[in-house]
Image: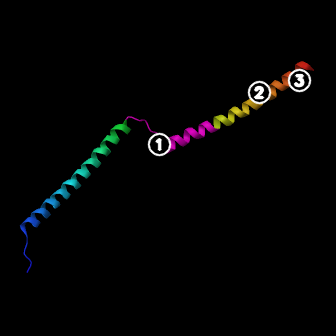
Amino acid sequence: MQTENPMIADFVKVLNSAAGTLAGLGREAGETARERAREVLGGFDFVSREEFQAVKDMASTAREEVETLKERIAALEAALAAKTQG
């Protein structure tokens, strides 16, 4: 038959209590960190992936149009220069 030492039993109770307290503190710290992150990030204006892609596509189209217009202007300038020289 095993006898229970009251000092060891008390020590185990203290350790169990400390473990529970630490676990609670860990959960509370995690919740606090998440809340702080929400507060900090809440001030930023983020766009969705779809909005970003739409603007990226618009910019790409605009770049292509600019290149086409540059080529047309260069051709018109060359034609005008040839006309005024000849």
Please identify the quarter of the rendering in which residue 59 is found.
Answer: top right
**Residue 16 x %, y %:** 16, 61
Using residue 8 as the reference point, say whether residue 27 is left or right of it: right
Amino acid type for the residue under numbered disc 2: Ile
Amino acid type for the residue under numbered disc 3: Ala
- Specify few, some or many for label 3: CA neighbours under 10 Å numbering under 14, 14-19, or 20 or more: few
- The residue at the point 72 percent across, 30 percent down is 69
Q: CA distance from mark 1 to mark 3?
A: 51 Å
Q: Which mark is residue 82?
A: 3
Q: Which element type, helix, strand or loop, lies under badge 2?
A: helix
Counting residues from the N terminus, which is met first, the one under dot 1 or under dot 3? 1
Compare residues 32 and 74 and report the one nearer the observer: 32
Q: Are marks 1 and 3 in contact (CB under 8 Å)?
A: no
Q: Which residues are magenta?
A: 43-60
Compare residues 22 and 11 and report the one nearer the observer: 11
Q: Which element type, helix, strand or loop, lies under badge 1?
A: loop
Image: 39 above or below 27: above
Q: Which mark is residue 66?
A: none
Counting residues from the N terminus, which is met first, the one under dot 1 or under dot 2? 1
- The residue at the point 76 percent across, 32 percent down is 71
Counting residues from the N terminus, which is met first, the one under dot 3 or under dot 2? 2
- The residue at the point 74 percent across, 30 percent down is 70
Using residue 18 as the reference point, say whether residue 41 is left or right of it: right
Name the chief secondary structure element in magenta.
helix
Q: Which mark is residue 48?
A: 1
Quadrant including the C terminus:
top right
Reading the image, the residue beneath label 2 is 73
